[in-house]
């Protein structure tokens, strides 16, 4: 997983006699280590050098795990790795995380960013990414999502979500595999663990994804449903890049975009909705239907709801109505459709699904509405 980098060391100028020479060298050093708006094809070789692309995103070299040279070139739409010397053991941390990001990372904030933003105020966070891969290296291509209880712009975040678009070599995410999930219409192997004080939830693609457009909030809701974040927390940054263990020259992010829509969301995230869930079933051998009724027992309306719950082992959802429900088994999240997003105080919304089961039939546990636990009727 990408380690959060330390602050870039202050560059010092060499001794000299002529003040004009010193001034020229200082100006050159400032161009290499600061983050001004950059023209296309700006090369960064200093360990934590950054620059701006597209007028709104930050490219960072972020060479934190090795003293060997790494150089990245910021392009008009992303970046490429031009030099990636050295290697580190594949059973440990990677040597770097060259990447592009929207948001705030160790006091560096991308121009005009809407981040940090409270999760409960975000209705959607559309993003698009295209990668270019190489085969003569050991690495993963990772999209990182950072969450924290506070709107911090520096330091270590509490939860990291990693989306592995590709991996080459004998490497694996932090922690251990905990199952499979369907998120944003794709299947993933899910890993969970921690890196110091940071919880890490990773989604690994079964085969390489070269480009994809998706909603970051689909993965954020997975973290919320698994108890690794709450809607009162903040999305601080989203980042796309590579974690190389060995070599890595030639890897590239060829395009990147990231937006955050805070016009909607899930009501007041500081005061989670109180709720009651009714769960009525019709069961036959090997199959069942469930009708779920959600009641807002709080005093504030909820505009945009997500109901999380855990299906018993052996149960699998085959289809659903009046909500988008995913994944099909395990820790499940049901999200409203456009016509039933509003939950007035005392009001109800209903949805249903059909499924299969093995063994003895049982009802789900752990219902929560927008991160707040619900009672069952």
Image (cartoon, helix red, strand yellow):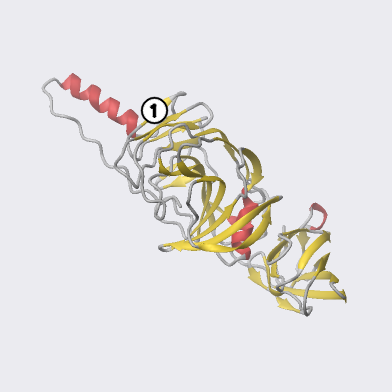
Furthest toward the left, the residue is 17
Say what secondary structure mark 1 lies in. strand
Q: Is residue 229 visible?
A: no
Number of numbered discs overlaid on the protein picture:
1
**Horizontal side of residue 350 vs 75, given as left or right:** right
* 359 vs 135: above or below: below
Judging depth in this view, the residue of 287 and 184 nearest the camera is 287
Judging depth in this view, the residue of 116 and 325 nearest the camera is 325
Residue at figure coordinates x 79%, y 55% from the top left:
337
User: How many residues crowd mark 1 within 10 Å: few (<14), some (14–19), many (20+)?
Assistant: many
* 336 vs 216: above or below: below
Residue at figure coordinates x 62%, y 37% from the top left:
211
**Horizontal side of residue 51 vs 165, given as left or right:** left
Task: Return the x and y of residue 274 as percentages of the image width and height.
Answer: 68, 72
What residue sits right under mark 1 in the picture? 43
* 199 vs 154: above or below: below
Task: Return the x and y of residue 339 as percentages of the image width and height.
Answer: 83, 54
Judging depth in this view, the residue of 8 and 143 nearest the camera is 143
* 124 vs 327: above or below: above
**Horizontal side of residue 8 vs 297, given as left or right:** left
Give the image quarter of residue 49: top left
Task: Return the x and y of residue 154 as percentages of the image width and height.
Answer: 40, 51
Q: Quick one: quadrant of the C terminus?
A: bottom right
Give the image quarter of residue 69: top left
Judging depth in this view, the residue of 245 and 273 nearest the camera is 245
Task: Return the x and y of residue 38 as percentages of the image width and height.
Answer: 43, 27
Residue at figure coordinates x 63%, y 66% from the top left:
371
Residue at figure coordinates x 24%, y 28% from the top left:
26
Q: Is residue 124 visible?
A: yes
């Amino acid at each position: 997983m990408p380690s959060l980098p330390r602050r870039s060391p202050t560059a010092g100028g060499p001794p000299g006699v002529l003040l004009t020479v010193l001034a020229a060298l200082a100006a050159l050093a400032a161009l290499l280590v600061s983050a001004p708006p950059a023209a296309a094809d700006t090369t960064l070789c200093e360990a934590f050098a950054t620059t701006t692309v597209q007028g709104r995103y930050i490219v960072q070299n972020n060479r934190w795990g090795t003293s060997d040279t790494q150089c990245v070139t910021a392009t008009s739409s992303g970046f490429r790795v031009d030099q990636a010397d050295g290697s580190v053991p594949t059973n440990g941390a990677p040597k770097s995380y060259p990447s592009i990001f929207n948001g705030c990372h160790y006091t560096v904030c991308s121009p005009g960013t809407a981040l940090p933003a409270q999760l409960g105020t975000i209705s959607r966070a559309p993003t698009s990414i295209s990668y270019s891969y190489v085969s003569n290296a050991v690495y993963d291509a990772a999209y990182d999502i950072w969450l924290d209880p506070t709107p911090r712009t520096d330091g270590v975040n509490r939860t990291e979500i990693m989306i592995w678009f590709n991996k080459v070599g004998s490497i694996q995410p932090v922690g251990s595999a905990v199952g499979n999930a369907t998120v944003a219409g794709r299947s993933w192997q899910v890993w969970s663990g921690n890196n110091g004080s940071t919880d890490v939830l990773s989604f690994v693609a079964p085969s390489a994804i070269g480009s994809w457009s998706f909603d970051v909030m689909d993965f954020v809701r997975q973290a919320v449903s698994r108890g690794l974040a709450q809607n009162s927390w903040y999305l601080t940054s989203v980042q796309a890049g590579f974690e190389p263990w060995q070599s890595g020259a030639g890897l590239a992010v060829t395009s990147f975009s990231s937006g955050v829509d805070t016009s909607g969301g899930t009501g007041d995230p500081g005061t989670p909705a109180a709720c009651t869930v009714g769960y009525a079933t019709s069961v036959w051998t090997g199959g069942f239907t469930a009708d779920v009724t959600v009641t807002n027992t709080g005093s504030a309306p909820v505009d945009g709801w997500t109901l999380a719950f855990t299906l018993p082992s052996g149960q699998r959802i085959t289809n659903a109505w009046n909500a988008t429900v995913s994944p099909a088994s395990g820790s499940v999240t049901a999200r409203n459709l456009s016509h039933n997003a509003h939950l007035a105080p005392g009001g109800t919304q209903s949805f249903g699904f059909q499924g299969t089961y093995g063994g003895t039939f049982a009802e789900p546990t752990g219902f929560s509405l927008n991160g707040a636990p619900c009672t069952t009727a």
